[in-house]
Amino acid sequence: MKYGDIVKYKGQLGELVTDDKKNFLFHPVKFGNYYYNQLDIVTENDIEVANFDEHISYIEQEFVWGEVIKTHCIGEYQIMEFKPEHKEDAISYHGYINFEDTNTTHCSIESALISLIARNKLEVNEARYAELFINKMLNGNL
């Protein structure tokens, strides 16, 4: 049981957060901002670890950048295909590593996957250069 784990509590999906006393609190999906006193204190006996499909459901419900079309899963990577708000006929791809948001959005699924692999497998500076190089290669800009 650790901060950020996606769990089920009383049949509802959410994530674990902690208060200033290091108690674990249940933050329900789509609850938004909160004060500690609005959340239930939980123990390991109170919660169930979310399964794979529940993890996908959680990130799709928490996604705020547009309408989710599909979530593509490739090993430890999840790529959310979505229609961005206020952009007619556009499709974008948002990346996660082990269900953790990388805060990156791309114009192609290939670019999203390259970015995720580079972020996950290389040092920060190496990842930036590798991602830039491969994206230029994919777009024929070398």
Image (cartoon, rainbow, N blue to C red):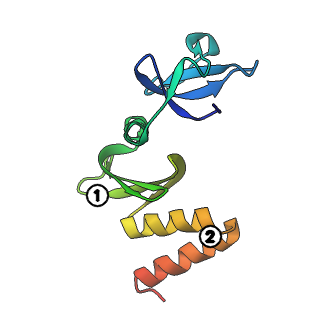
In the rendering, at what x and y percent does residue 106 appear?
A: 43, 62
In the rendering, at what x and y percent does residue 27 appear?
A: 53, 23
Query: Looking at the image, which residue is at 70% across and 19% down?
Result: 23
125 w.r.t. 99: above or below: below
Query: Looking at the image, which residue is at 62% across and 27% down?
Result: 17
Query: Looking at the image, which residue is at 59% across and 63% down?
Result: 119
Query: Looking at the image, which residue is at 61% across and 20% down?
Result: 25
Answer whether residue 108 is visible to the viewer in this image: no
75 w.r.t. 99: above or below: below
Residue carrying label 1: 90
Q: What count of labels does the image hold? A: 2
Q: Count residues near mark 2 (Cα–Cα under 10 Å), then give few for <14, some for 14-19, many for 20+.
A: some
Outermost residue, right direction? 21
Residue carrying label 2: 127
Outermost residue, left direction? 89
Question: In the drawing, does residue 122 fall left or right of residue 108?
Answer: right
In the rendering, at what x and y percent does residue 104 appear?
A: 51, 56
Return the mark for residue 55: none
Q: Count residues near mark 1 (Cα–Cα under 10 Å), then give few for <14, some for 14-19, many for 20+.
A: few
Q: What separation in Å lies between label 1 and label 2 (alpha carbons)?
A: 27 Å
Amino acid found under the numbered disc labelled 1: Ala
Circles 1 and 2: CB atoms closer than 8 Å: no
27 w.r.t. 50: above or below: above
Outermost residue, bottom direction? 142
In the rendering, at what x and y percent does residue 112 appear?
A: 44, 64
Q: Which badge, 1 or 2, is on the more N-terminal residue?
A: 1
